[in-house]
Amino acid sequence: MYATGCEDIRFEDMTVYSTPGSNAFREMTGGGGNTYLRCRVVPCPQGADPVKRAMPRLRSGGHDAFNSRAMRKGPIYDGCEARNHCDDDININGGYWMVASAEHSVELRNVADVSCSDFRSHVAAGMR
C-alpha cells in the first residue's frame, strides 16, 4: 500500500500477508500525520493461503513492514503488528538537510537531500 503526497489519512484493520515487491505500508513526501490502527503484516495462515503448501508460509515479506519517508509529520501506529519479514518492522526516515550558507537571519540559501529528487517542493525558507 503506497500513499504519496498525503496527510491525515487513517488506515484501519488492514492485513497484508505478502510483500513480494516492496514495503507493506509506505508513505512518502506529504504533510503526514497518518494513522495506522490495527494494521498487520503477518504470514498468511495456512488455512487461508490460496496456494496449497506442504508447510505454512514462513515469511510475510522481504522489506520494511511500515515505512515513512520524507513526511513533514510522523505517523501514528496504534495496535499494529509486524512479524516474520526480512527487514525493519518500522522505518521512519527522511533526508539529511545541509544549509550551505545563510546571512544574518535564518534564511534558506542552498540545500541538498540525496533521498528525495524533488526536495525543493518539500523545503521552504523558515521551515525547521
Image: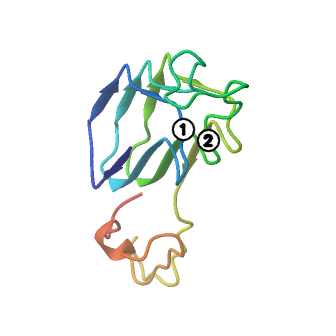
How crowded is the residue under tag 2: few (<14 C-alpha within 10 Å), some, or many (20+)?
Answer: many
- Disc 1: which residue: 18
Q: Quadrant of the C terminus?
A: bottom left
Amino acid type of disc 2?
Answer: Gly
> Which residue bears the numbered disc 2?
61
Give the residue type that dot 1 points to.
Answer: Ser
One can see residue 107 in this view: no
Residue 100 left/right relative to 103: right
Quadrant of the rendered structure where residue 84 is?
Answer: top right
At 55% across and 49% down in the image, what residue appears? 20
Is 121 or 20 nearer to us in this picture?
Answer: 20
| Residue 92 at x, y percent in the picture | 55, 46
Query: Is residue 41 at all visible to an observer of this figure?
Result: yes
Q: Closer to the N terminus: mark 2 or mark 1?
A: 1
Q: Residue at the spot x=54%, y=32% of the render?
A: 51
Residue contact between numbered discs 2 and 1, judged by CB atoms under 8 Å:
yes
